[in-house]
Image (cartoon, rainbow, N blue to C red):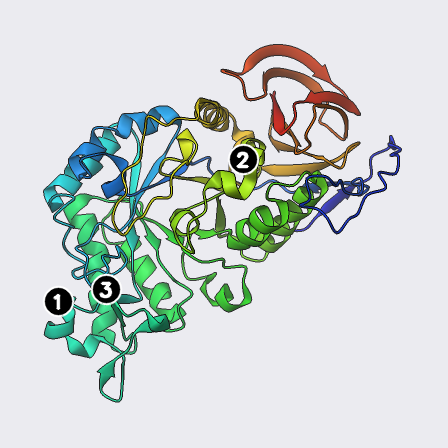
Amino acid sequence: MKKIISIIAAAILFSSCGCNKDSDNDATQGDAPNDTESITYPEATGNNYVIYELNVGSFTKEGTFNAAAARLQDLKNLGVDIVWLMPIYPRGGGINSPYAATDFQATNPKYGTIDDLKALVEAAHKIDLQVWLDWVPNHTATDAKWVSSNPEFYKKKNGSMIHPNNYGDVFQLDYTNPDLAKAMTDCLKFWIDQADIDGYRCDYVSSPEIPATYWASAIPEVKNHKPGKSITFLAEGDLTDSNNRRLVSTGFEYDYAWGFQEGGLYKTVGKGISGSSLQKVCENMLAASDAIKPVKRMIYLTNHDQNYNDGGHLISDIYGENVYPLTALLFTFNGMPLLYNGQEIGGKQILDYFNDTKINWDNRDEKMYSIIKNIAAIKHATTALRDDAQIIIHKTSSPQTFAYTRASGNDAVLTVINLGTSAIDVEIDGALPGTYTQKYNGGNAPEKISETIAAPAKITVPQKGFVIYTK
C-alpha cells in the first residue's frame, strides 16, 4: 500500500510532555506528541462484514445446533454478518479437543445431527447470515477412523505415526499422498453439499506439512464446486509473516492480523495511555497489509486461543478500560472485526472450549453491548467503513489520542480515541471539512447532529473513550 503524504498547511505547535518514551504501557506515563504529517492510504473496494466466533457447546445452555439456531436473530440484531462455528466434528484423542476430529464428515453427537446443522444454516440464510465452518487440515485425532481405515494418509517416522508439535492427541496428515489431499478436498465439498455452508476458517495453515500447492489447488476447486455458490476462505495465520507469504496467492480472502493484535494491541498498547503507540501499531499493520493484497485482514481483540490457552486471559485483563475505545477501533479502523462468543456482553469468563463452558448471559456489560451494537450499525450504514476504504491518519495535540478518518466517495467517518485517564479537548489536524450528521461517544445511541468541522478541529473526547463523527 503506497503512502500518500499530505503536508498540512496549518502547522500545530505542541508543548513538550517531558515523558519517558520507553514506558508506553505505564499508566502513569505519557509519550511524545505525534509530530508526523497526516498520512492518507488510497481507497480500495471491500465489504463491511462483522464475523462472530461461536462455540456451539458454549453458546447456549443446551449446547446444540437447534438451540444456537434459535438465537441467531440475537446475533443479527447485534450486527453480525458471519457466524464462524468452531469445530463441529466428533472429538477424540483423549482430551476432548475440538481440534482433534475423529471424522470430518460427521457432527459431534452432543451438538446434533447433520440435518440439525443444515437447519441452522437454513435459519441463518433466512436472515442474511453466513455460516462458516472451522476446518482442521493438519491432523486428526489419534483415534480417527482414518487411522485404521487409511493409515497411508498419515506421516510416519520409523513406521509410527507422528504427533505434530508434540500434541499427543493428534496424528499428522501426509500431504505428499495425493489420495489424502483429494480426501480432504472432498470433505470440504461435503459440507457444501450437506449443509450449504458459506466458508471455512482454516486452522494452522502455517503448518510446514501442508504445501501451498494444496491450497492453490483445493481452494478454487471448492469455490467452483457448486455453481452460483460463494465460498470464502479465512486463513488462521498472519500472511504478512515471512514464513506464510507462500500462501498469499493461493486463494485465501482473509487472514488473521495476528501481529496487529498479538504484538501490537495486546503487548504494546494493553492498558496503557499512549495514543502515539496505538497509532504506530496501526500504521505498521497498514504497511504490512500492503504486501499481501488482495488478501484482506480479520482483526480482533481476543479469540478462543487467548481467552483460554496459557492459563486464560479475560479481555479486561489484557486491556482494562481501554477495551471500550479499542472496540471502537476494531469496527472503524481497517479490516473485518471478529467478536468471540460472549465478547458482546463483556467477555467476563474464561471459556474452556475443551469442555464447552457455558456462557453466563446474565453477567452483562451493558456498555460493551451498546457500543458493539451501535458501531456495527454505523459500519453497515456507510461505505466509509468497508474493510479497505480510504484511511487518513491525523496529527493530534495530545499523545494520549489517536485520530483517523475513513472515507469513500461522499461518506466519511472521523474517529478520535483517547487512552488517557481524563477527558481531553484535542485538536485534530487534517479532518475532512464538512457537515457531520451523526456523533457517537459510547452512549445508548448515536446523536443526530448538524455540525461543521474544519481543520484544525477541536473535539472533546471522554477518558478511556472515543468519539465517532459521520457524514
Quadrant of residue 49 in the image? top left
Regarding mark 1 in the picture, which secondary structure is present there?
Answer: helix
Badge 1 density bin: few <14, some 14–19, many ≥20, Cα 10 Å? some
Residue that mark 3 sits on? 184
The residue under the point 87% across, 30% down is: 10
Mark 2 secondary-structure assignment: helix
Callout count: 3
Which of the marked residues, 2 or 1, is nearer the chain's N terminus?
A: 1
Q: Position of residue 262 (x, y in %)?
A: 53, 52
- Asked if one can make out residue 223 in the rendered structure from this viewpoint, the answer is yes
Task: Answer above or below: position of 385 versus 201.
Answer: above
* Relative vertical location of residue 382 with respect to residue 261 in this rendering, above or below: above
| C-alpha gap between disc 2 and disc 1 | 44 Å
Check whether the beta carbons of the residues at disc 2 and disc 1 lie within 8 A of each other: no
Which residue has dot 2 on it?
323
Mark number displayed over residue 145:
1
Between marks 3 and 2, how big is the CA–CA gap?
39 Å
Query: Mark 3, residues whose alpha carbon is within 10 Å: few (<14), some, or many (≥20)?
Result: many
Name which of mark 3 and mark 2 comes first in the sequence: 3
Counting residues from the N terminus, which is met first, the one under dot 3 or under dot 1?
1
Do the residues under discs 3 and 1 have CB atoms within 8 angstroms? Answer: no
Circle 3 or circle 1, nearest the eye: 1
Label 3 sits on what residue type?
A: Met
Q: Quadrant of residue 279?
A: top right
Amino acid tagged 2:
Val
